[in-house]
Image (tube, rainbow, N blue to C red):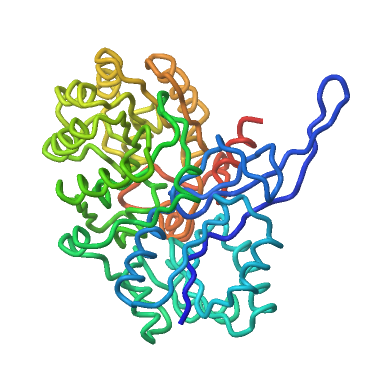
Amino acid sequence: MKILFSNPPWWQDLSWHTLDNGATFPIHRAGVRAGSRWPFTYQIPIPPDRFEFGSYLPYPFFMGYAATYSAKALGVPVVFRDSIALRESYDRYYDYLERERFDLIVIESASPSWDHDQTVMREIVRRLPHTRFVITGPITSLGEEILNVAPNIQAAVRGEYEKGVVKAVNGSSGVIDFDLLTLEEMNAAPFPYFDHLYAYRYWDSNPVGQLAPHAQVLSSRGCPFKCIFCVWPATMTGNDPDGSGKRFVRHYSGDYLEAFLTELVHKYHFKSIYFDDDTFNLGDRHVEKVCAIMRKLQVPWSAMCRSDTSGLHLWKEMKESGCFGVKVGFESGNQEVVDKIVNKRLNLEDARRVAHEIKRVGMTLHGTFTFGLPGETPEQVQDTERYISTLPLDSIQKSGCAEIEGAPLHALSRQKSLPAYPSARLDDNYVRATDGQLKYENLAH
C-alpha cells in the first residue's frame, strides 16, 4: 500500500494585461485550497512550473497533520505533495503520479475547487485506473452524494481526518463520519509534516512585520463562535452546518507546543512564527502559556485574534514576548450586521478601543472585513467603510462573502432562513458565489 496526501495543482485561464505603452504581459490565475479556510483564486504573474517566493501560500494544516499521523499509525509508505506550493503544472503532476503509481490518494477539497478537482480525479483514473481516492475537507458535508461524482472514490472522511484516513486504509468505505482527535490524542500525535523542500515556500505577508522564512502553525483547533461564513469550525473541527449546535476548542499543551516550535526553529531556522488558529487568544491562560514559550524561543511571532476574548493587559504581554502584530476580524462596521447577519457577538465600539490599545503597545494591526453578506444593504456597506477609517490599521483585507458547503451561509441558501442569523436573507442585493476573491473583485468593479 502506497499513500499520497495530495494538494493538486489549481490553475485557471491565462489572461493578458496591457500597459499604458501598449506592451502586454501574461497574468495567471492560481488557487489556494488545503490550508485556506475559504479557498479562492487570485492573479499571479508567474506561470506553472516556476516558483517565486512572495505570493500568499497557506500551510495545509489538516493534510500535514494527517500525513504524519497516518505514517505512524499504518507503518506504510506515506508521501506528502503540495503541488500548489510547488507551483507545478498539471503535466508535471500527472507525470509524477504515473512514475510513483500510488494505491490511494487523499485529496482535501471545498466548494470553490470541487468542480475542478473532479476533473483532476477523472484524468488520474484515465491514466491510472487502479488509483483510489479518499476525499476530505468541507466538501464532504455533501455526504453520500460525493461518492458518485467521480470514479474510484472509496471514502469521504468528514471533519479533521487523521483517524478517518486510517480507517479507509484499513478497509472502511463510504462516508466516514466525524471522529475527531481527543485532547489527549491531539497532544500525543506526531508533529505535522515539514521538510526542506516545502518549509520555506509558505507565506502570508500580514500582519505587517513578518520575517521570511516563517512557519504557519496552530496552537489550538476549533472556535466557539458561529460567524455565518466561517467554514472550519462548522465542518472540520465540528459538525455545525447551520449554527445551531455546540462548537468546541482544543488547545495544544504547553509541552507539545514548546517541543514542536523548538524543533521547527532549530531545524529550519525560521525567523518568525505565525499562529493561524481560528482564534488564537481564546482565554488568558492560553495566551500566557504561548507568551512564556515564545520568550524562551526568542523568535518574533504574530497571531490571528479576536479583540474581545482575552484580557486587555495581555496585548502588552504579547508584545513583550515578541509578538509584533495581530490579525483581527471585524467583518462589518454596522452593529446590526455583526449581530444579526454575521452572528459574531462583537461590540464594535469595544473592538475599536482594543484596536487603539494594540497600536499603543506597539504592534501592527491587520483588519479583516467581509462584503456582500446576505441581507446587507448599501448603506450598511458604507457604515463599514466609515468604521474602517476610524481604525489604526496597518493593513486590511476586504473579502467577498463566499458560500462554501457545510458553513451556515450555505445552509441559508437551502433553508432561506436560519434562527441564529435573523437578518440574513437572500435578497436582490445578495450575490451567490463560492470564490470570495472573485466576488469581491466583481463587487468592487
| Nearer to the camera, 333 or 376 | 333
| Nearer to the camera, 229 or 375 | 229
Quadrant assignment for the C terminus: top right
The residue furthest left is 285
Q: Position of residue 87 (x, y in %)?
A: 62, 50
Residue located 58% across and 73% down the image:
100
Q: Where is residue 106 in the image (x, y as percent from the top left)?
A: 48, 70
Q: Quadrant of residue 298?
A: top left
Is 398 situated left or right of 296 in this image? right
User: Compared with residue 181, is residue 351 higher up or lower down, i.e. above or below?
Assistant: above
Q: Where is residue 365 in the image (x, y as percent from the top left)?
A: 36, 23
Residue located 68% across and 72% down the image:
123
Residue located 51% across and 64% down the image:
6
Q: Quadrant of residue 332?
A: top left
User: Compared with residue 173, is residue 67 higher up or lower down, i.e. above or below?
Assistant: above
User: Compared with residue 189, is residue 135 higher up or lower down, i.e. above or below?
Assistant: below
Is 135 situated left or right of 52 in this image? left
Is 407 situated left or right of 315 in this image? right
Number of numbered discs on residues: 0
The residue furthest front is 267
Q: Position of residue 174 (x, y in %)?
A: 43, 82
Residue located 69% across and 40% down the image:
46
